[in-house]
Image: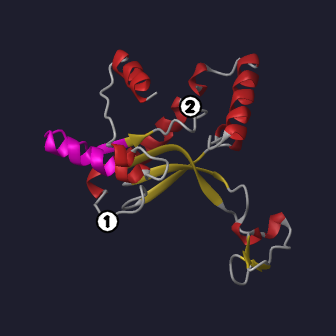
Amino acid sequence: MTRRLASVGLAHGAETYARPPHLATDEALVIDALKDLLHTLQAEHEPPEWVVLLEPTCPLRTADDVRECLKLVAEGGYDSVATFKEAELNPHRAWRLTEGVPEVFIDGAIPWLPRQKLPNAYQLNGAVYVFRAGLLAPETKSLLVGRPGAVLMPRERSQDIDDNLDFTIVEALLKQYNHEQIPATIA
C-alpha cells in the first residue's frame, strides 16, 4: 500500500518519504515520524520553515479548512494551528472505573448538569496541523508548539477514520455529499 500511495504522490509532483520500519507501526507516533523527516531534510540541507500535516484519516476537510489554518498563522502570529471540533463527550461527563467502582474523571465535576451548563469543550479532529518546523525539538510531545491557535470545523466534516464503523460513516457522508452537489473540495 505504501508504494502505491507514493506512486500516486510522485505522479502528481510530490516528493515522498518512506518512514523507517520502526516509525511505520500501529504504535508509532506521527510526531516521531515528523521529527525523523525534519532530521532527514536538515541533513539534505532542505529544512522547511513550516510544516502542514494533512492526515489521511480525516478526508472530509476542505481546501478552505487548510486556508483558514494558514491564514491564522500568517495574520495571527501563531507558531502552530490545528483544527478542532466540539467535543463528542464533555470531559465533565466522563467517568473512570477503578476496580469496578465509577468515579468522575475530573475531580469536582458534576456530570448531571444540563448540557447548557457545562463548560464548552473541544477536541482535535486530526484534519489539519500547521506548525513552525524549528520549534519541533526532540523533547517536544505536541504539534501545538509555541503560540498555538485553533480553527473550529463542523462536526459533519470532522470525521476521523479509526475503525470500520468510522469508514462506513465517512463513506455514507461522501455519497450524501455527492447527491447534494457539495463542492469537490470535500475529498
| Dot label at residue 155 | none
- Closest to the observer, 135 or 55: 55
Give how far across and how far down residue 58 sits, in percent: 57, 38
Give how far across and how far down residue 63 sits, in percent: 51, 30
**Category of crowding for the residue at label 1, using alpha-carbon neighbours closer than 10 angstroms: few (below 14), some (14–19), many (at least 20):** few
Residue 151 visible somewhere in the drawing: yes
- Which residue is pictured at 31% across the width and 56% down the height? 136
Give how far across and how far down residue 16 sits, in percent: 32, 29
Mark sitting earlier along the chain (1/2): 2
- Which residue is pictured at 61% across the width and 56% down the height? 123
Residue placed under numbered mark 1 in the picture? 139
Looking at the rendering, the stretch of residues picked out in magenta corresponds to 34-51
Quadrant in the rendering for residue 21:
top left
Amino acid bearing label 2: Thr
What secondary structure is marked by label 1? Answer: loop
Q: Separation of disc 1 and disc 2 at Cα? A: 32 Å
- Closest to the observer, 162 or 159: 162
Residue 156 visible somewhere in the drawing: no
For the C terminus, the image quarter is: top right
Q: Is residue 61 above or below residue 95?
A: above
Residue 25 lies left or right of residue 111; in this view the side is left
What secondary structure is marked by label 2? Answer: loop
Does the magenta-highlighted stretch encompass residue 116? no
- Which residue is pictured at 36% across the width and 53% down the height? 32
Colouring used for the render = secondary structure
Residue 56 lies left or right of residue 43; in this view the side is right
Amino acid bearing label 1: Glu
Residue placed under numbered mark 2 in the picture? 62
- Closest to the observer, 3 or 49: 3
- Closest to the observer, 90 or 34: 34
Give how far across and how far down residue 78 sits, in percent: 39, 54
Residue 186 lies left or right of residue 111; in this view the side is left
